Image (cartoon, coloured by chain):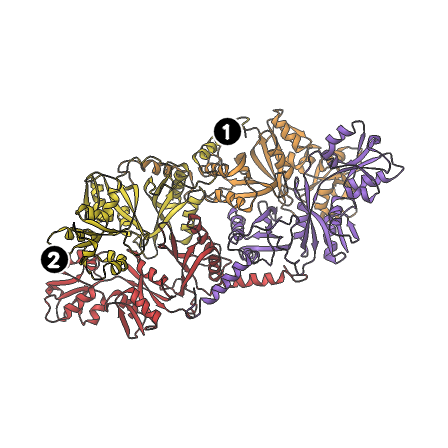
Chain colours: A yellow, B red, C purple, D orange
Amino acid sequence: MLGYFGPAGTFTHQALLSVSDEEAVALPSVAQALDAVRSGQIDGAVVPIENSVEGGVSATLDELIAGDPLVIVGEIVIPVTFGLYTRPGTRLEDVRHVLTHGHALAQVRQWLSRELPEALVTAAGSTAGAALEVADPGSRHDAAVCARVAGKIYGLDEVAYGIEDNPGAVTRFVMVGRPGPVPSRTGRDKTTLVAYMHEDRSGALLEILEQFAVRGVNLTRIESRPTKTFLGSYCFAIDAEGHLHDRRVTEALLGLHRICRDVIFLGSYARADKQPPDVPMGFSDADFHSATQWLATLERPNGDR
Amino acid sequence: MLGYFGPAGTFTHQALLSVSDEEAVALPSVAQALDAVRSGQIDGAVVPIENSVEGGVSATLDELIAGDPLVIVGEIVIPVTFGLYTRPGTRLEDVRHVLTHGHALAQVRQWLSRELPEALVTAAGSTAGAALEVADPGSRHDAAVCARVAGKIYGLDEVAYGIEDNPGAVTRFVMVGRPGPVPSRTGRDKTTLVAYMHEDRSGALLEILEQFAVRGVNLTRIESRPTKTFLGSYCFAIDAEGHLHDRRVTEALLGLHRICRDVIFLGSYARADKQPPDVPMGFSDADFHSATQWLATLERPNGDR
Amino acid sequence: MLGYFGPAGTFTHQALLSVSDEEAVALPSVAQALDAVRSGQIDGAVVPIENSVEGGVSATLDELIAGDPLVIVGEIVIPVTFGLYTRPGTRLEDVRHVLTHGHALAQVRQWLSRELPEALVTAAGSTAGAALEVADPGSRHDAAVCARVAGKIYGLDEVAYGIEDNPGAVTRFVMVGRPGPVPSRTGRDKTTLVAYMHEDRSGALLEILEQFAVRGVNLTRIESRPTKTFLGSYCFAIDAEGHLHDRRVTEALLGLHRICRDVIFLGSYARADKQPPDVPMGFSDADFHSATQWLATLERPNGDR
Amino acid sequence: MLGYFGPAGTFTHQALLSVSDEEAVALPSVAQALDAVRSGQIDGAVVPIENSVEGGVSATLDELIAGDPLVIVGEIVIPVTFGLYTRPGTRLEDVRHVLTHGHALAQVRQWLSRELPEALVTAAGSTAGAALEVADPGSRHDAAVCARVAGKIYGLDEVAYGIEDNPGAVTRFVMVGRPGPVPSRTGRDKTTLVAYMHEDRSGALLEILEQFAVRGVNLTRIESRPTKTFLGSYCFAIDAEGHLHDRRVTEALLGLHRICRDVIFLGSYARADKQPPDVPMGFSDADFHSATQWLATLERPNGDR
């Protein structure tokens, strides 16, 4: 069974539905969702990790690092797109009371004032909660601004879609599981890890980046987090192109482990954007293999060069 | 006149009081505090920028970058230390009802259950608000968990101090002003800036770090923030050791400007910890001066070597 | 007056003639040629510095470094091409006795055995001396293998040219003068210098190379030379793309001077191959200028970003 | 059987004698000495590779690279120390005629003019030849300036030793053999190799050095040599601290092989100076082993961190 950071009808829920039809359970916090994976209550949980506007979801990263090991087994990127959902039968021009969460409201304000200048807008605890309330035939609210999944779950009509004022924002979610064999290589993978340095000095980050650069591994993201020991002490969460089983990635991880105080491997998984890695000349598995074969000839009498 | 992210009685307020006796105005949000500086309503504002446990205060950084230029003119580091403050005359053993904010409660839970196992604890909207309420002689709450400054402002008795379960957490605040001559060099300074890369590739961060490393400038902090254009596009907020007027820093900034799409200078200011920089051999102002003098001899007949 | 490492009729002489019609004096060694410049006896000397097959001419480099300062003011690249030169009137098929230097012989052996299988070949002290001897009507040698310039000087007939077995070898010469204003920038220049490190460790060379790399300056050649103090102590002679007056080169030299024990500037001069430098984005003089202008705005009230 | 670049009585001979009592054959050139190893005529040859004053012996390096593979199996460092050797019975004050090679003469000129101001000095073809001549009872020369070994071989008396004007010069020799199992690790080893880059650009050398730096391998020497294809095309001969069987060296070689057009392994052997390598934290074999063990845990259920 899978789970997600709920409630039902949120973008996190939508992210999960985009990859699984399985029944899934909503958990009230990221921490509880991850702990349910740890305890074996569920086999995987979908949680948000990064937003293209707000940046990293620090709580998720901190919860992944703390406690028993967990790994990321997949990623999902979902556009943050809102729609206006009404109680069945209500047309756009009939909407008088709109219910939604404050964050969502901030993102659709221009649309509302243009399309529903007369409507009264009320803030709810969540967009999913707004949809639930609107679904109640006795409610005085007749429309909710929410994710499409919420409209569907609560049986509402979609009378407008893509109504956010600045389209293009996306949120990245990860599916988290317990450690075990990593998902098979797809050739279009990412690897996530957290590196703790021995000393807190600027040079250390440079050395970490060089461990990747010197093996031709590109990084797609780097986020510093406090180690919580003292001000100025950071660890670095890194997303690298490639899979643990790509030799250049394997070797970068080994190199990192040697120079760092600690490295936490958080998984290798297929990239949501399916973009192939940019592997510089000399860093494919074939190149690693050929170097190893060359090494083997060095101590042979009359070794071929 | 100065301002701060209020209300009165918070750690931000305490940070301001630790450096200024001037009358100051509390602003309800970081954005409003910074805008008050921009508009000239106040001359400087104290806002939180980083916590040793929670990490960067992204909102502050984002607000500093957006809108008209602002600069950091000073930093203040304050321990996050709570005390128990009672209505005058109430002794510790007489406390029955404690009022505080949920975050503060989480940090003093063990102390409360050990010292006041019988007390009823209620959550307030803020620790400063809790102190205000306790100060009311008609209140049923007789003690507040809050910052020392709140106890003092509302005339409460300090019956315990340093009651947090895990001491050592600190918050770093910055005093923000309008651009102008930077504060004088103290020899123990920091410079903050934000670098936007031309292309979003891992190599670009390495190049940015090298601009500092090659000039002997240590970094004390680096934080990635989304540029808000698309997922995977980041800028980097950097705290570097040294002052804009230190030649190694001047040159690193010039170098950065050349290789970056944009660099935002966010100020040079005295370090709160007064730690002198670690300047490697060859990177003092004297070394820069002596190199320049050497250059001048190169084109002279019989130039001395 | 100019001079060159003689005798007349060598490739060094030919190099000088390719750039100057002036009367010139032949000096018997590189050291004597350079000392004649130092003493003011001549204004410039042409000496060999590198061969595409043999590598650096260490003696020239060592002599340039030792003693009073000298600078390179130009470079000349000459193909090492041999011809067969006969006493006037002697046709190829009449040649019976060939005279040449051992080095030259080694490079035309195949041609001689194919074209003059019956000829007797004798070794002379130099190819120029061979030409001089052949010019003597009383000589029993009727042909010399030498540089074209020697054939011309001694009035011989060129009966074959380009007879080396492996064509393509070239020698690079430099014109050396006393320090003074460097030759004007042509936009296609080279700068030569020698760097002495503070400590003899591998990391130091990496740091030297980084001083260039971080300023976008390509190197065309690097040669290690012993400092003559103890085994394992080296200095590095470096040829860099660009002119002392190119800002990226100026700054690289300043940076080098700061991290090195000593830097000897050996001149900026037009490249023989006239190849334009590969200046990466951000490293043109215009980029340096624009960075400086940006810096000037940082301390202005309401400084533009 | 061993061989050396002769004749008998040279410093190269002395170098061989310092490590082997075996009978050995003198070969007339470095090329012939190395070819005798290649053909199996001898099992090893001692040849000079570097002098603390003159720099690298390019001919040796070029001959090692060209032709069938050879490897260095040991190194020997010998002080370049001259003595005055007389025909038995001749005392210093009786010396009238001194014979030696021009190079040697240049290095003992001051001593001779101080100690034997009246003596007549004649140049011989080699210092060993001078000793041979002096040993002849019928010779008019009664003393030779030569290496100690020559004095001993030809039965001369040592009447002075260490007479060079600038003491401290040393020459480094290598014992060269055919490829096969490399000599055992002593913990104080060196590895020699030659790297050919894919493109001839300055960045390539930086990348080569980084392959070593990022694995904590120090370099003790780097020498550029022309590839003999065109001017400006170089390969790099590198001496690195450590043994092929040190994991940091193994990995650096593999890394180098991947990014280079070609790498020629020229052997791992005990250092003459017996200096232990400076292995930075994280680069010992134990560190490599522990990183590998860590890697193995990553895919285990409930993998320990």
Measuring from the top left, give residue D217's x and y in whole percent: 48, 42
Residue B156, position in %: x, y?
17, 70
- Where C185 falls versus D63 (above or below)? below
CB under 8 Å between discs 1 and 2: no
Q: Amino acid at mark 1?
A: Thr
C153 left or right, relative to C46: right
Residue B177 lies in quadrant: bottom left
Q: Is the residue A168 above or below the residue B284 in the image?
A: above
For label 1, the SS is helix
Crowdedness near tag 2: few (<14), some (14–19) or many (≥20) residues, C-alpha within 10 Å: few
Disc 2 is attached to a residue of which chain?
B
Taking depth in this image into account, of C166 and A270 the one nearest to the observer is A270
Report whether residue B57 is seen. Answer: no
- Disc ID at residue A297: 1
Q: In the rendering, at what x and y percent does residue A89 appear?
A: 16, 50
Q: Amino acid at mark 2?
A: Pro
* Residue C152, x across and y down, in percent: 81, 43
- In the image, A7: left or right of A303? left
In the rendered view, tell whether residue B286 sits above or below residue A228: below
Q: Is residue B156 visible?
A: yes
* Residue linked to disc 2: B117
Identify the subunit bearing mark 1: A
Q: Nearer the viewer, residue D60 or A248?
A: A248
Q: Give the residue furthest to the right.
A: C138
Mark 2: which secondary structure? loop
Q: Quadrant of the C terminus of chain D?
A: top left
